Image (spheres, rainbow, N blue to C red):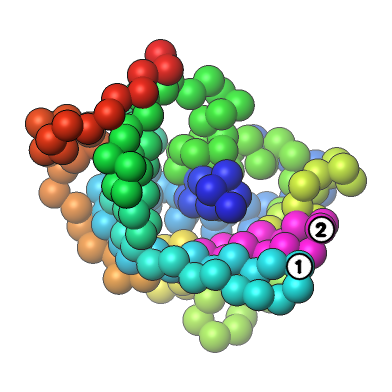
Amino acid sequence: MKKSFLIIISLIVSLSVFCQATDPKAKAVIDKAAAKMQNGAYTADAKLTFTAQQGDKTVQNGAINMSGNKFRLKMNDMETIFDGKTQWVYAEKLNEVTISEPDKTELEQISPVAMIGGYAKKYRIAFETADEDGFYHIALYPNNKDSEFFRIRLLINKKTNELSKIEMSNRNGERITIELSAFKTLAVTPETFVFQKNKYPKVLVNDLR
């Protein structure tokens, strides 16, 4: 569940590679959404819904701050912070923080900047529908039939170019959906994307660097 969530939040980024059979108009829509994310700093509400094979659902609510390849995600009692190099994962119930420096592969599972760029090399991008309910509906289909996900759907607001919804359908029947809303401009300080140890008395530090 944790890994799946970290994967899905990371789909908020620009496409850097044009993959075979990709619809250029669909790619252009994602490029606009990515440019808005990368060229500014934003905060947004986030809602995660995990649907198990049997249909049971787990819902989490939280918030995410984003600026370029940096992000800070707070979801229930877990907070993940990435400053472009170092990642901190803080577990509130344990009062424990794990510090690491993700490599490229790991970063594609957690970083709002790295993820969709990685997926662009592996997926065909196409419109599902371009003129419905105020959103562009875009689907990503894997070139590799052994991919964990057989389809990823993106909903992008036509007026604001904001990424509003992501749905990932797993071959094992699981489905993960994240909805982003209430985008606001974020005022960034040097502390925004860094774990402030002094604010967590007696925190247990697990440094994996």
Question: Where is residue 85 drawn, in percent x and y?
Answer: 37, 22
* Disc 1 + disc 2, Cβ < 8 Å: yes
Residue 200, located in which quarter of the rendered image? top left
Amino acid tagged 1? Gln
Question: Where is residue 128 drawn, in percent x and y?
Answer: 72, 71
Residue 152 visible: yes
In space, the residues marked 1 and 2 are separated at their CA atoms by: 7 Å
Question: Where is residue 50 drawn, in percent x and y?
Answer: 59, 66
Furthest-right residue in view? 145
Residue 130, located in which quarter of the rendered image? bottom right
Furthest-top residue in view? 209
Q: Is residue 37 magenta?
A: no
Q: Which residue in the structure is indicated by mark 1?
A: 53
Question: Where is residue 28 drawn, in percent x and y?
Answer: 57, 53
Task: Please tell me which of labels 1 and 2 falls first in the chain.
Answer: 1
Q: Residues within 10 Å of mark 2 (few under 14, many from 20)?
A: few
Residue 177, located in which quarter of the rendered image? bottom right
* Local secondary structure at mark 2: loop
Amino acid tagged 2? Asn
Decide whether the magenta segment is chiefly helix, strand or loop: strand
Residue plotted at (60% across, 74% down): 57
* Local secondary structure at mark 1: loop
Q: Which residue in the structure is indicated by mark 2?
A: 172
